[in-house]
Image (tube, rainbow, N blue to C red):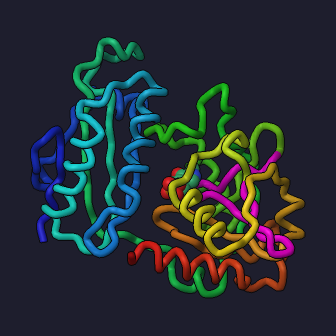
């Protein structure tokens, strides 16, 4: 099936979907993006993702070319045009074509790009047995340098952390913030469970406000579990009963080891399983 890529209102074949080498999205990572999930032909939490796209854009002083409603509509059209029942949508807004200088005022119109495709998931064994992760030396961006709330096209902070994780034999890695507190993983938010209570770092730990994180907090409350946002340290994870990550691509995935310390009994725990099941049900609804 040929991919139809949306650029500024037009659907183009993959080979024709091109952006200028002078676009500041390429030259400087000057732009914002979203990753969304398609379940049963419908985009999960579309409004939340589009709201976050607008907030990211606002924070970098980028005016989006369409309204929220128009972007939602364009995303739905892209899903339909690609006849995807289950998959992933990447929404990208670049600053547009500019000069070889930083000044965003010299850029032309922002470019809205929508790509819908199948999704490459983590291998099933990780969902069954849990991930082993390490804490990397790369800290999450200092909020005064670049807020982690902005889902910007400059993902080098996370990529450098991911490289360190991979070199340490882990496909996901824990990032601390500038205060040494737990922030998040390179592409996922983190939760732990201790004595039946679910906790996750607060947004001011310097993390992305994950859409899946919010959904899991809602589910925990619905299930009658105690769920709070709390400053966490690595130690809290070492001594937790359970740990799991959340993300649009990963959904809910158990973590069974951090820095060679087994978490709980080293197996995905019952609360993680319960929330995973509830999440699967939620996306099917
Ligand atoms: N943190 C980071 C750094 C991310 O890039 C992502 C998205 N992959 C997440 C957390 C999870 O956010 P969401 O649930 O909205 O996908």
Whether residue 257 is situated above or below residue 235 in the rendered picture = below
Q: Residue at x 16, y 47 (%)?
A: 17
The image shows residue 91 at horizontal and vertical percentages of 32, 48
Q: Quadrant of the N terminus?
A: bottom left
Residue 187 among magenta residues: yes
The image shows residue 15 at horizontal and vertical percentages of 13, 53
Picture quadrant where residue 115 is located = bottom left
Between 95 and 230, the one nearer to me in the picture = 230
Q: Residue at x 78, y 70 (%)?
A: 193
Whether residue 29 is situated above or below residue 124 in the rendered picture = above
Whether residue 118 is situated above or below residue 75 in the rendered picture = below
The image shows residue 145 at horizontal and vertical percentages of 63, 26
Q: Quadrant of the C terminus?
A: bottom left
The total of numbered circles placed on residues is 0
The main secondary structure of the magenta stretch is strand
Q: Is residue 239 left or right of residue 92?
A: right
Between 97 and 197, the one nearer to me in the picture = 197
Q: Is residue 143 left or right of residue 60?
A: right
Whether residue 50 is situated above or below residue 107 in the rendered picture = below
Q: Residue at x 64, y 45 (%)?
A: 207
The image shows residue 111 at horizontal and vertical percentages of 24, 34
Picture quadrant where residue 51 is located = top left
Residue 202 among magenta residues: no
Q: Residue at x 47, y 79 (%)?
A: 281
Picture quadrant where residue 256 is located = bottom right
**Residue 30 visible to the viewer:** yes
**Residue 187 visible to the viewer:** no
Between 3 and 285, the one nearer to me in the picture = 285
Q: Which residues are magenta?
A: 181-200
Q: Is residue 104 left or right of residue 217?
A: left
């Amino acid at each position: 099936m040929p991919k139809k890529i949306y650029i500024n209102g037009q659907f183009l074949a993959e080979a024709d979907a091109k952006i200028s080498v002078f676009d500041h999205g390429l030259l400087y990572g000057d732009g914002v993006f979203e990753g969304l999930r398609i379940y049963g032909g419908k985009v999960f939490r579309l409004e939340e993702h589009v709201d976050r796209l607008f907030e990211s854009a606002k924070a970098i002083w980028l005016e989006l070319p369409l309204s929220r409603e128009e972007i939602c509509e364009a995303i739905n059209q892209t899903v339909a045009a690609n006849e995807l029942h289950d998959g992933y949508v990447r929404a990208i807004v670049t600053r547009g074509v500019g000069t070889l200088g930083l000044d965003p005022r010299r850029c032309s119109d922002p470019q809205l790009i929508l790509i819908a495709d199948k999704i490459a998931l983590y291998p099933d064994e990780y969902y069954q047995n849990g991930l082993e992760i390490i804490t990397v030396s790369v800290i999450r961006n200092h909020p005064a340098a670049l807020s982690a709330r902005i889902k910007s096209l400059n993902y080098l902070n996370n990529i450098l952390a991911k490289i360190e994780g991979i070199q340490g034999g882990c496909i996901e890695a824990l990032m601390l913030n500038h205060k040494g507190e737990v922030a998040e993983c390179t592409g996922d938010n983190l939760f732990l469970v201790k004595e039946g209570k679910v906790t996750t770092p607060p947004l001011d730990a310097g993390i992305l406000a994950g859409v899946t994180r919010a959904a899991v907090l809602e589910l925990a409350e619905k299930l009658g579990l105690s769920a709070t946002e709390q400053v966490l340290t690595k130690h809290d994870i070492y001594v937790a009963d359970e740990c799991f990550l959340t993300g649009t691509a990963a959904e809910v995935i158990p973590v069974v080891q951090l820095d060679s310390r087994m978490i709980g009994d080293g197996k995905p725990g019952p609360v993680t399983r319960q929330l995973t099941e509830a999440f699967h049900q939620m996306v099917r609804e």
